Image (cartoon, rainbow, N blue to C red):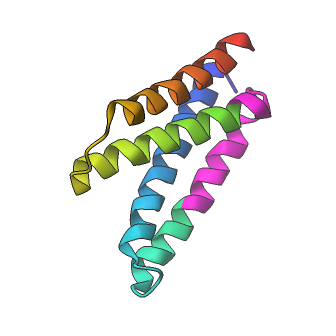
Amino acid sequence: MTPALALLCLAGAAGLDVVANLLLKASDGFRRPLPGVAALALVLCAFGLLGLSLRAVPLSVAYAVWGGLGIVGAALLSRKLEGLRFTPRAWAGLALILGSVAALHLGH
């Protein structure tokens, strides 16, 4: 697997993870089972893509990219969908997450 394809798998895994988290919220603590089951299925798919990416990317980098993009993606989508307001400190935190992931990736 090429490094570019591995990074694409990582981005896909992070995207699936974000959607799974939104579905998990929509399940209302599994009171609505369909979104909850869909969330579990997407998490399994995300782990599959993460596993594929490990063929070309070290675990430390892959997990940081997956987790960091998932956190930032979920935060930004929550902001968009739920109208959450971020303080400057929250924006700084998101920037630090992205900067940390980038530094780890570039340092590899």
Quadrant in which residue 6 is drawn: top right
Quadrant in which residue 90 is drawn: top left
Q: The C terminus lies in which quarter of the figure?
A: top right
- Decide: is 69 above or below 24: above
Q: The N terminus lies in which quarter of the figure?
A: top right
| Residue 11 belongs to magenta span | no
- Decide: is 79 above or below 53: below
The residue positioned farthest toward the bottom in the image shown: 31
Q: Nearer the viewer, residue 59 or 28?
A: 28
Q: Nearer the viewer, residue 7 or 62?
A: 62
- Decide: is 108 above or below 63: above
The residue positioned farthest toward the left in the image shown: 83
The residue positioned farthest toward the top in the image shown: 107
- Decide: is 99 above or below 21: above
Q: Residue at x 58, y 52 (%)?
A: 46
Please state the total of marks drawn on the protein image.
0
Q: Residue at x 54, y 20 (%)?
A: 99
- Which region is colored magenta? 43-61
